[in-house]
Amino acid sequence: MPRFSVVVFALMAIAGAATPARAQSAAPATAPVGAAAPTAAPTAASSCSVVVLTLVGTNLADSEGGLSAALTGTLANEAAASSGCAVLTQADINAMLEVEATRQGCSDGADSCLAELGAALGANRVIAGTLARVGTELTINARLMNVTNAVVEQRTEQVAVDVDHARIAARNAARALFGRPLLDVSTVVVAAPVVPAPAPTGPSALLLGGAGVGVAGLVIGGVGGVLVAGAEGALTDPAKLNKQADLDQGRLGLVVLGVGAAVAVVGGVLVTVALLPE
């Protein structure tokens, strides 16, 4: 007997063994005299059941390894709310029975294989699909298959512009499979990422350099001013006959003063650039 058939047979045995227990637990208990009659529970969940297989990831990043399982859970929850059926996921199956052989047997996702698996679990329908990344978008392709006649009743494709909108796409996939109105993606509020405040830092090298250049310019300009002042005093002294040396000193002082002013301006520009916001 093939390995997959053995696992399916075991699943059928488990499902059959669980049926009397469910029937026994469903028997109404005798209410005490004077107690209020219990409210009748909806019967939709007991009349249908759906198995949701884990979405098969395609072209996902290494950091998105758990995305398929997470979105499968979202799809299953919405399927239960949209259909009113009892929903069982592949994770639930794994918790009850080791199904590695089952996953291998249905690795190609063939409809006949999924129908056999759903029948073994006593399900009326099976939901299977894929989760694929195309650029920055995530695409969910899902199909709803009737186990009884092994035909696909509904197909849907939902696209999420990014990971933040992937959950709404998974919910819409389930709603589309059961004919429910889709949720408006534009109303989804995506929490803004928390950006930590930058750590306080000391003055930048450009700021310190500009300040240093500015101070140097002031010093140079001061030296030039002293030379000019000295030359001016000597030129106004009537007792001094040789004025050429004083004239040369005055010219030199003016040059030094001009250089100092230029250097100070450069330092001011550097400081201004350093203080501009990034």
Image: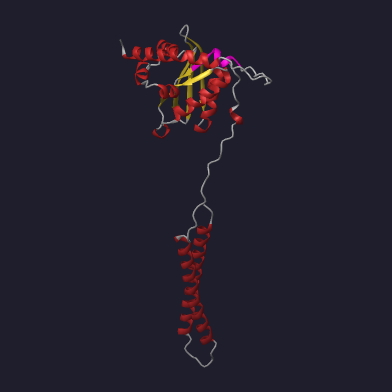
Q: Say left or right for 79 vs 109.
A: right
Residue 32 visible, this orientation: yes
Q: Residue furthest bottom?
A: 239
Q: Quick one: 124 or 9, which is closer to the camera?
A: 9
Residue 135 is drawn in which quadrant? top left
Is residue 134 visible from the viewing direction of this image? no
Quadrant of the snapshot with the N terminus = top left
* Residue 6, position as x, y percentages in the image: 34, 13
Is residue 44 found inside the magenta-colored segment of the image?
yes
Q: Residue furthest front?
A: 33
Residue at 31 percent of width and 11 percent of height: 2
Q: Is 267 or 70 nearer to us in this picture?
A: 70
Give the residue furthest to the top.
149
Q: Is residue 134 above or below residue 107?
A: below
| Residue extent of the magenta highlight | 42-50
Depth check, front residue: 247 or 199: 199
Q: Residue at x 51, y 78 (%)?
A: 225
Q: Residue at x 45, y 27 (%)?
A: 69
Relative side of 58 to 164, left or right: left
Task: Give how far across and how far down residue 5 sits, in percent.
Answer: 35, 12
